[in-house]
Amino acid sequence: MQPAITVGLDGSPESLAAARWAADEAENRGLTLRLLHAWPLLAPEPARVTAEVDQNYWAKRLVHTAQAELRAHHPDLVVVGNLVAEDAQEALLQAASESEMLVLGSRGLEAVESYFMGDVSMPVVARAERPVVLVRAEPTAEGPAPAAAARVVVALKLHDSGEELLDFAFHTAAARGVALLAVHGRSVPLHARTPWGADHEVAEEMTRKTQKELSRALRPWHEKYPQVEVADSIRLASPAKAVVQAAEGSALLVVGRRAHRHGVAPHLGPVAHAALHHGRCPVAVVPHD
């Protein structure tokens, strides 16, 4: 199968935004774009049938309309449609295993609602073998893009990030021709907290030590992707809060999750949860060892 980016399409504004984002990414990476619509009640495809009696008419129209729009904006991009008579979750997981990445729409959620992201996206993100990108509906406000939009942000643990995470983040930044910001958050120990913040000497020492470790972790990726401009940010805050704040307005936030071992229930860590629930920009969740 030709390398492809697959996007789950259901006709919602969020899935259409995901398709547009995926088309840009596929073009940047020189990949095929696959539009997947899965519904268990799709009828077997007859040899010849008119639109009036075709039970799959609306599903076909959904995919064909998206194809036409994307081809108009990306005339050199190969865009293929795929209708699958399967449960959406299982179809998306299978598609993810066959793709460079899977792209899904994500509702903009706030407050209490942010704990409920839908029946499909969260299980797929937690179980997929390949990176999954969640994209919110595009904003309606017009105006110049903020400077932060010209960068990819990656949430970096110093001893547990995995090569897959950094390779995906650097590859994406290189394909888009944008800068990369590596963010590391670390909470100040309880004994170093004061009513007005953190003990200055402790904060300085933590930052200095972390900076050395961060530079060491990024050095091999500087060498592999010399064309990518890289900056780092060390924030004395919880990793989840640090990452969400740093990614505000960015082109993409990349976070990792531990690939689940056999017999262990799949789950997302606190940073991935915070990014998916509260991040405003597209979020890529990358499984790693």
Image: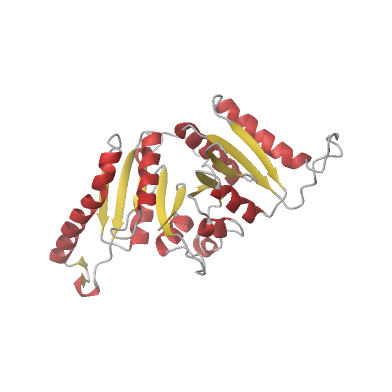
Q: Position of residue 178 (x, y in %)?
A: 35, 36
Query: Viewed as shown, does residue 53 lie left or right of 197?
Result: right
Q: Is residue 174 visible?
A: yes
Q: Residue furthest left?
A: 201
Outermost bottom residue: 191
Please tell me whether residue 164 is drawn above or below residue 19 in the rendered image. Answer: below
Q: Quadrant of the C terminus?
A: bottom left
Q: Quadrant of residue 244?
A: bottom left
Residue 149 in view, yes or no: no
The relative height of residue 142 versus residue 256 in the rendered view (above or below) is: above
Find residue 118 and report its horizontal and vertical position in percent.
Answer: 59, 58
Front residue of 208 and 32: 32
Q: What percent of the width, then of the height, locates residue 240?
A: 37, 60
Residue occupying image coordinates x 45% and y 50%: 283
Coloration of the structure image: secondary structure
Q: Quadrant of the N terminus?
A: top right
What x and y, as percent, mark residue 209? 17, 59
